[in-house]
Image (cartoon, rainbow, N blue to C red):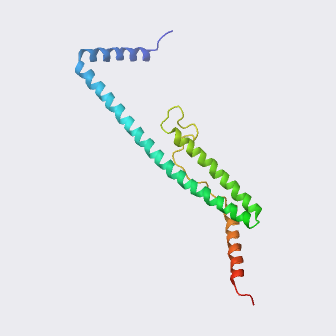
Amino acid sequence: MEHSWLENLERNLEAKLDQWLADRPDQQILLENHEYNNAQATAQARRAELLKESHQLRQALLAQGQTIGLWHRRQEQARAANRKALADQCAHYEQRCRKQGQIMWERLQTIGNPDHHNRATGGRRSWRPLEVPLALERAWSAFVVEQELEDLRYQSPQS
């Protein structure tokens, strides 16, 4: 196999550097210290990044749990009012939130593990709650207004 001139140049320069460092042990020590310090700085930066990500993920998980609870309660309210279609929409959205929460939880468990890094999340660094579908938001708002009107009818004196 024939070597290119670039590979020959690279080998030649490597050999000269090795010889130069062998002739100057103090420079070899300085180089090793520099490489060690760079590795330490890189490791510290990575640790800080992982701590930040885990903190953000824990906060997002707490918010996700509140969202799941909210939509579970709304589903129960809709079922209690015999609004099956609305209850089903709430349940579907709750399930989507639970799936996203499961992905977050799996990522939190693998933070810092190089074998699993970015596998479940595709490298996502920021977590936002799922957007509530506009149709569901409107249906829920209409339901709340209907319930409030019904409550007012029951509270008003009968004439």
Q: Looking at the picture, how far across and down is residue 28, in whole percent?
A: 27, 21
Residue 3 vertical placement versus 140 (above, below):
above
Residue 91 vs 36, above or below: the answer is below
Q: Residue furthest bottom?
A: 159
Q: Position of residue 147 (x, y in %)?
A: 70, 73
Whole-percent x and y of residue 74? 66, 63
Q: Is residue 158 above or below residue 37?
A: below
Residue for point 57% across, 57% down:
66
**Which residue is at a point 36% across and 14% down the rendered structure image?**
12
Q: Nearer the viewer, residue 38 or 75?
A: 75
In the rendered image, which quarter is residue 153 located in?
Answer: bottom right
Residue in the foreground of this view, choosing between 92 and 35: 92
Q: How many marks?
A: 0
Q: Is residue 102 left or right of residue 85?
A: left
Give whichever of 130, 19 is nearer the camera.
130
Quarter-wise, where is residue 29 in the image?
top left
Task: State the quadrant of the C terminus.
Answer: bottom right
Q: Residue at the spot x=67%, y=58% of the render?
A: 133
Q: Nearer the viewer, residue 17 or 152?
A: 152
Q: Quadrant of residue 17?
A: top left
| Relative to 20, 117 lies left or right | right
Residue 120: x, y in percent?
A: 58, 39
Residue in view at x 71 percent, y 73 percent: 146
Q: Is residue 85 left or right of residue 56?
A: right
